[in-house]
Amino acid sequence: MADTAPFLSLTGVTKSYGPVEALKGVDLDVHAGDVLALVGDNGAGKSSLVKILAGAHPPSGGEIRLKGEPVHFASPGDALQKGIATIYQDLAVAPRLSITENIFLGSELTRTIPGLPGLHLLDKRRMRREAGALLTRLSVNVADADTPVERLSGGQRQAVALSRALRWDARMIIMDEPTAALGVQETRLVLDLIRRLHAEGRTVVLISHNMADVCAVATRVAVLKGGRKVIDRGIDGVDADRLAHMVMTGREG
Amino acid sequence: MNEITRRDLVGGALALSTVGLAGTAAAAAGFELAVVAFQMSSETHARVANAAAAAGKAKGWSTTILNSEGSLPKHAEQLETLIQSKPSAIIVAMGKPVEAEEQLKKAKDAGIPVVMVMSGASPHILFDIEANEYKVGAEAALWLLGQMGFQGKILTERFDGNVGTRIRGRVLDAVLAENTGVKVVGSHAMARTQSWRDDVRQGMQTQLLQHGTEIDGLWASFDGQAFVIDDILKAQGVKKGQIKFVSIDGGAETFRRIADPDSLLMATVAIPFEAMGSGAVEALDRIVVKKEAKAAITAGPYLFMDATLVDAVNVAQFLKP
Amino acid sequence: MTALRPFLATYGTALAGLAVVVVFALLKPVFLTPANFAIILKETAFLGILSLGFTLALVTAELDLSIAEVASLSAVVTGALVHAGFGATVAVAAGLSTGLVCGAANGLVVTRLRVPSLIATLGMAAIAKGLGFMITQGVAFVGRWPVSFTGLARGSIFGLSNLAWWLAGTAAACWVLLDWTRIGAHLRATGEAEEAARLAGVATGRMKRAGLTMCGLGAGLTGVLLAASLSSAAPNMAGDHFLYAIAAVLLGMTMFEPGRPNVPGTLVAAFSLKALGNGLVLVGAAYYVQDIVLGLVIVASVALSAGALGRAAFVEKLNFKRPS
């Protein structure tokens, strides 16, 4: 690792919802270029951790550092500005909006008309062109960038959501169950997308129940259990069966 | 595929229904009379409009009634559209000459004669057929005070949202100012809403609860209010004549109640709405068809028609056999 | 046929409208004269501006049931000031502000107090109605008002009535805003997928407030123009526009962009409704026939595009279907 400090570092992070303690003090370092898989049972604290990382919920306690500097994410938009994009399982895209509208949602391109300096109009042609280019870059072929996203397959939707993250030039991309409810073909497409991100030097945090997928793309794995991180190690020597055992028992052995 | 057929069906149905409508309308050439009523759901407006339409049809004129549904914008819009179709004449019942001034002026410029009924004066129309509301108000007020011997307590149900009924109330005030033996112990002012009957019932029920036993007289600004109050009193077991009860407008239901021993209503000042409607047609016939001068009918902006006080003495003449 | 299908799905209602125009034109040639079209256009102004405002609110999947009462209140405020002898500028500014404030209040109640817009705006409707009666005491302000005020709505420029220009200006502004600016893109995203939009960094609360505020402003402008055009102001004067405005927006959602509230759709629908009313008057249909035909047209048009409307964002919201 070239950087001395991790890209993102959590120290003693806790989260309570009323009397329920979802996270009981989590330390986690995410290094630049990692593909970190976050695994654990339902209720282990994965969703709470993702929401904190994404800026959707503030932590109840503990500290977050971004490249060594203490940081506070006021909103998802704020986290996005700081280079962290999150792709949620259900809410990754707005189904009825077009591919272009989805990719440029929140970062629309505008142009001015000569003589009307104050008026910023959407540059639809350029957005359509760049949307096509982004998808091509991810090796996803869609005929028309004006197609509503609801007509796309699950894998293609993930690609659209990823394109949006890339539009923001996100350094770290959090993907929440990206392969859930996808067929074999589609899953392969999404895993390829993750490999491509890794190859571009981006950091990926992958939340998944599918141990085979995790083992296929992750470089590191962190296991959560009962609101604590119990295992944090490289993926070397871990296969799907062993990982499933680790999740169940909370032990590496 | 399914979608296309449904769309086609609806489009076709629309076209058909319009063709059907037009067939009925295009029947008569010749004199085309358009009657615009401000609010057909109001009985008096409907009486004028229907009487005018009936009189027009009797003359063999092609006649249509439009309803502005009590809406000023719609009133202006209908007049404006009508002018495009160039009718031979327009009669407006209870219209709004000030609000629709722009449209009335266009009618005048287009050479379309307009007669209004109970609407108010306008320089752009032939004339407005009116009952003199000041006279009407005075008749009602003096009948009530006379019956009470100019002594006692009364309740009033007012409506200030309409010019005519407001004038009736103001004239009552003037009469009361000169005759201090009669005191208004309670009054309810009706709001201008679609549920005005409920409003009158609630308001009067409260007043009657407080003053019901002590009052000698009741005054209502128009018959519709009087019917509501009459029904409350009937339910309370009050007998005819115990409370002197007058209102204004006249009409079959009013006359029936005045003659009915179970009803409390004793008198009304009957405004000749039907005669106003047919009178408008008659006047148009003379001016437009027979080319008489307008001055032969009336000199001023108004054509007044007399209202008649109807009570137990003469109600029999007004009841239909 | 396959090529025809998407065309019909997008323009079917507009074509039905065109069919109606042709039928009226055949029956009553005066219907198709420029003078008559100028009248329809002028009469479309009130309904059109009110409906365009409603469109902007509905784009964010929020309803505004207070438009007619707010328009009436704005008319009353404007009329009261003109009647009291204030200048046209002051009166118009007050009338527009009334609409703006009511709309902003709707927006705040919906986003900050989390009251569903269906209820919040129903409350606003009652309040605006009450205020209108309070100011007027039930008696309309009527008078021969100065031309500096009534001229806003009466008269014409380049042969087109001032009211038509107001409509054109409002429509152009709404269209540019909704289709060609970032705010427009965010308004739509807020309506179509609120949570996804929020997570993408769109200020959804602010967008809802903006939609409802602009809706109020549209109602305010409608009220001011009504008062100027009729030289009077009554607390219920815009009342009959409410159902027509809703009908116009729903009909508009069946064209151009099926399932989405959109500016050209609303405009064409408002014009069609007014053209239908105008044609029925011209062919001499009795008043009750007009009501029946208008009702049938509204129900039929919405029924035939029920598929598109059923998927509309605000309908899903009313069904309390929320993304999990």
Image: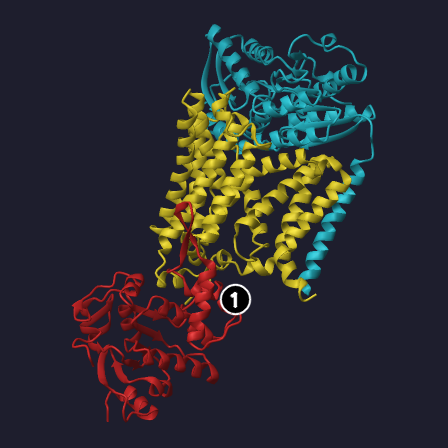
Chain colours: A red, B cyan, C yellow
Q: Quadrant of residue A68?
A: bottom left
Q: Chain of mark 1?
A: A
- Label 1 sits on residue: A147
Residue C204 spot, x, y in % from top left: 37, 56
Q: Quadrant of residue B197?
A: top right
Q: Is residue C63 visible?
A: no
What residue is drawn where x is 61% and y is 20%?
A: B119
What residue is drawn where x is 67% and y is 67%?
A: C2
Residue B295 spot, x, y in % from top left: 72, 8
Q: Is residue C141 visible?
A: yes
Pick the residue in front: C160 or C188.
Answer: C160
- Compared to B244, does C118 lie above or below? below
Pick the residue in front: C312 or B69.
Answer: C312
Q: How many marks?
A: 1
Q: Residue furthest front?
A: A114
Residue C70 spot, x, y in % from top left: 45, 37
Instruction: Specify few, some or many for label 1: CA neighbours under 10 Å numbering under 14, 14-19, or 20 or more.
Output: some
What residue is drawn where x is 59% and y is 35%?
A: C42
Helix, strand or loop under label 1: loop
The reply, left or right, for residue A50 in relation to residue B39 is: left
Pick the residue in front: B167 or A41.
Answer: A41
Q: Quadrant of residue C1?
A: bottom right
**Label 1 is placed on what type of residue?**
Thr
Residue B256 spot, x, y in % from top left: 68, 24
Q: Residue furthest top?
A: B178
Give the quadrant of the C terminus of chain C. Answer: bottom left
